[in-house]
Amino acid sequence: MTWSDQQIRAWEALDLGPRWQRRTTESAVVEPVDWDQLRHQVASCKACALWQSRKQTVFGSGTESARWAIIGEAPGAEEDLQGEAFVGMAGQLLDQMLLSMGWHRSRDVFIANVLKCRPPGNRNPSPEEALACAHHLEAQLLRLRPKALLIMGRVAAQHLLGHEASIASLRGKTQHVRMGRATQMLEVPALVTYHPAYLLRNLDDKAKAWEDLQRFAELLAAHQCLP
Ligand code: URA
């Protein structure tokens, strides 16, 4: 649900806390801040228990002046070590996929995850962790204001689109990611594709991911985002 400013003020006037908290992934509490502030907020975050097991937070990689973004799930062991997104095996495949399209991770795209901390053992993020972390990704996207998103995998798709459809049913159709409110409102066309970690285990689906990249290039072209 998107809350209007008036509704938020009325709700806050009810003073229902601490028992009631407005739990929402939309950005009623997310103000536009600069990249340094965002980095600081992520690096010092203790909003869920993952801060206790992380080596470091993973803010995101690529360029903060990108016109489009890739959204993955959460840092793995290598990302936790290096503090960069998608630098393990899945990241190497992602780099190859980008390069095969003539795109470069450091020049063309901003890459971020739903979670900024590694879930131990690379388990899936819990809904509570995703919710606690949501404001970081939202603030990043509100700052970046990308023209298109490539969503990798089911966890990121569920989080950004708000429903539990399978990747197979989401692929191939332009989806819309909505966040923010009032003047900060952001609606971004997005395509969903397989996560590179899944592709490493399911080689036959690489051809489908390649089709998705072709379609995504068309989306970028339509929004004048091709390098
Ligand atoms: N998988 C992800 O979803 N993100 C990363 O940064 C690394 C692996």
Image (spheres, helix red, strand yellow):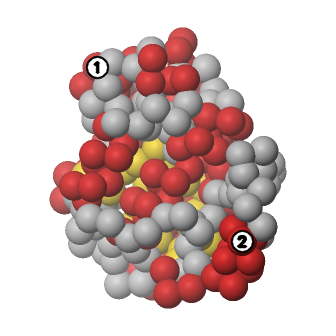
- Which label belongs to residue 136? none
Image coordinates for residue 79, horizontal then vertical, percent: 34, 27
Mark identifier at residue 13:
2
Left or right of 25 in this view: 72 = left
Instruction: Tell me which residue sits at (56%, 85%) in the image.
Output: 182
Residue at the image position 72 percent from the left and 51 percent from the top: 17
Residue 97 place in picture, x, y as percent: 38, 46
Q: State the image quarter where residue 169 is shown.
A: bottom right
Query: Which is in the foreground here, disc 2 or disc 1?
Result: 2
Q: Name which residue lies at 53% across and 77% down.
A: 186
Tag 2–tag 1 contact (CB < 8 Å): no
Q: Is residue 59 above or below residue 204?
A: below
Q: Residue at x 31, y 37 (%)?
A: 43
Q: Quadrant of the C terminus?
A: bottom left
Can residue 83 be seen in the rendering of this structure?
yes
How far from the left and from the top, in percent, is residue 225? Answer: 34, 77
Asked if residue 34 is positioned above or below residue 164 in the image, the reply reads: below
Q: Residues within 10 Å of mark 1 (few under 14, many from 20)?
A: some
Q: To which residue does mark 1 refer?
A: 81
Task: Please give left or right for residue 22 compared with residue 96 in the image.
Answer: right
Q: CA distance from mark 2 to mark 1?
A: 44 Å
In the rendered structure, which amino acid carries the disc numbered 2? Answer: Ala
Q: Earlier in the sequence, mark 2 or mark 1?
A: 2
Q: Identify which residue, 52 or 77, lies in the foreground.
A: 52
Quick one: SS at disc 2?
helix
Q: Residues within 10 Å of mark 2 (few under 14, many from 20)?
A: few
Q: Is residue 69 above or below residue 134?
A: below
Can the viewer see residue 91 in this picture?
A: no
State which quarter of the image contains the N terminus. bottom right
Asked if 211 appears above or below 225 in the picture, the reply is: above
Which amino acid type corresponds to the residue marked 1 in the rendered image?
Leu
Q: Position of residue 93 (x, y in %)?
A: 38, 35
